Amino acid sequence: MTQRRPHLLGASGLPWILPAVAVLLALSIYPLIYAVKVSLTGPGGAFTFANFARLAGDRVFAAAGVQTLVLTIAALIIEFTLGLALALLIDSLARAKSFFRAGLLIPMLLPPVVAAVAWRLIFNPQFGVLNGTLRELGLNTASLLWTGGDRSALASVILVDVWEWTPFLFLLLSAGLQAIPPEPVEAARIDGAGAWQIFRDVTLPLLRPVILLALLLRAMDLVRIFDQIFILTQGGPGTATETVSLYIYRTAFRFSNFGYAAAMSFVLLAATMVFARGLAQIMRPRTAGVR
Amino acid sequence: MKAVLRYLAAVAALMAALAPVYWLVTISLKREIDQFAYPPRWIGFAPTLQHYVEAFGSGSFGMYFTNSVLLAAMSTVAALLIGVPAAYGLTRFEWPRDWNNRIADWILSTRMLPPIVTIVPLFLMLREMHLINSLLGLAIVYTGFNLPFVVWMMRGFFAEVPREIEEAAMLDGESRVGALMRIVLPLVKPGLAATAVFCLVVAWNEFLFALILTQTNAAMTLPVGIASRVTQYEIKWGAMSAAGVVAMLPVLVFATAVQKYLVRGLSLGAVKG
């Protein structure tokens, strides 16, 4: 009789995963349930829908939602375009590729708080280096308030995010480009396709899974953006850069209205789940080999 | 000619990426009169270490630094101790009806929860347990935050080790745990190290949880300490920049160490890079 394969010998993986499942139940699922309870509890401890009803009429929340959406979409488009251009550019260099790659990644690696502090130094209208340099070049900077201006604050925040996270798109797209087998590109070239045609009809379709993955990961992070804005503008001036995360933070930890904060956070959760579903679908087939 | 233009474009991009970091470093090294001089001094100033001395000598940044180190270390060790066995369990056993993949998906989904969603209940829960303003409380939260990441990364690394290797060891009399410790873990050591480094960096850089769960000097982390100075009325830019430079150095060192796995880690294991 042949010996049975050891992994079939009374093998249950359950004990191995139980601690992890228990920790995640305690730190993710239980808090979610707790949040539902908090959001449905009124001041006297009575059951209430008031927190959710209030959402519909809250204009600050609506503005924060719109701003979060604008920021997410604008940053995604710019970061993707720049990231792809950079990936193609660096990929086309004959030498020093890894030098440029390592250097270009640095903004993304910094603690977000530190990156934002650097930009506060740069943006300051009076003594910041940005206006200082522009003035040196002979420009009138009196009206350039950057994060301090009603109309320019959101754009300035987007600028910082583009600086900080274009490297992420660049890195993933670079990896995607390197993984493309040379044969289809060669074949297209032999068939007489031009550089643009090869890019559009061969490279881009082959990059598609990586592009989707990168965009979804980034989108999920953008809708919850907090750190940079907290340092740069605290949501101001006025509510010009108020985002959903920031408003929830203020509601809970400045005004101690935990119920309403929890209710709002479920809106953010719903938005995240849209992206998460898409992500799960992309990640699934890639790990199908894992058994 | 075209090649020259390409290099010029690449150099310009690199300068755009590095200029803000460079500026922060110069501010941390400049005397106060040079910091905001006009025209801006990119080079040619008399460097001083006075801001580093101020921030870490007499100031509280030394304590914040220690807190950040302890916190990153504690939460990383805990996440690995709990997450590595889970990853092993999900890759190496027969699971009925695809349950291993279902559980893995669920684990990943907990990672995707926006922190602001769980922070309100976690704050209330930890307050009841008197774990606010305590490194332990924050370490527990970070462990839960890094755990899904560890499971997903290590699942990928374990899957790359042929099962036959440990089966052979077990036929030779090794126990399951013995085979894991003596055969499999050494084989995935680079992956394990990279996973640990990612956990360290995430804990080191994290801000929102730390901001809410630590409000006293004794428990604050470096990012929170820096942030608390920015929101003050009079900002000491020198000391703050010095603290910022110190906060970013370990991350840059670590990132260089795991360069090979950077893509894999940032894509939660989805892109092998």
Image (spheres, rainbow, N blue to C red):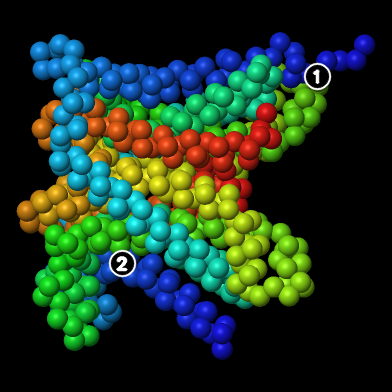
Chain label for disc 2: B
Q: Amino acid at mark 1?
A: Arg
Number of other residues with Cα within 10 Å of mark 2, as a class: few under 14, some 14 to 19, many 20 or more: many
Front residue (pair B70, A28): A28
Residue sitting at x 75%, y 13%: A9
The numbered mark at residue A5 is 1
- Most extreme residue toward the bottom is B1
Checking the image for residue A227, the label placed there is none
- Say if A73 sits above or below B114 in the image: below
Task: Give the secondary structure at mark 2.
Answer: helix
Q: Quadrant of the N terminus of chain B?
A: bottom right
Q: Looking at the picture, do discs 2 and 1 lie on one chain? A: no
The residue at the far left in this view is B233
Q: Picture quarter containing residue B120?
A: top left
Does residue A30 appear to the left or right of B39 in the view shown?
right
Circle 1 residues within 10 Å: few <14, some 14–19, many ≥20: few
Secondary structure state at the residue bearing disc 1? loop
The residue under the point 27% across, 32% down is A265
Residue A240: percent from left, percent from top: 17, 53
Q: Chain of mark 1?
A: A
Place residue B42 in its image quadrant: bottom left
* Callout 2 amino acid: Pro
Q: Name the residue at 29% across, 42% down.
A: B207
Cα–Cα span, label 2 and label 1: 58 Å
The answer to whether A167 is drawn above or below residue A38 in the figure is: below
Question: Which residue is disc 2 drawn over?
Answer: B20
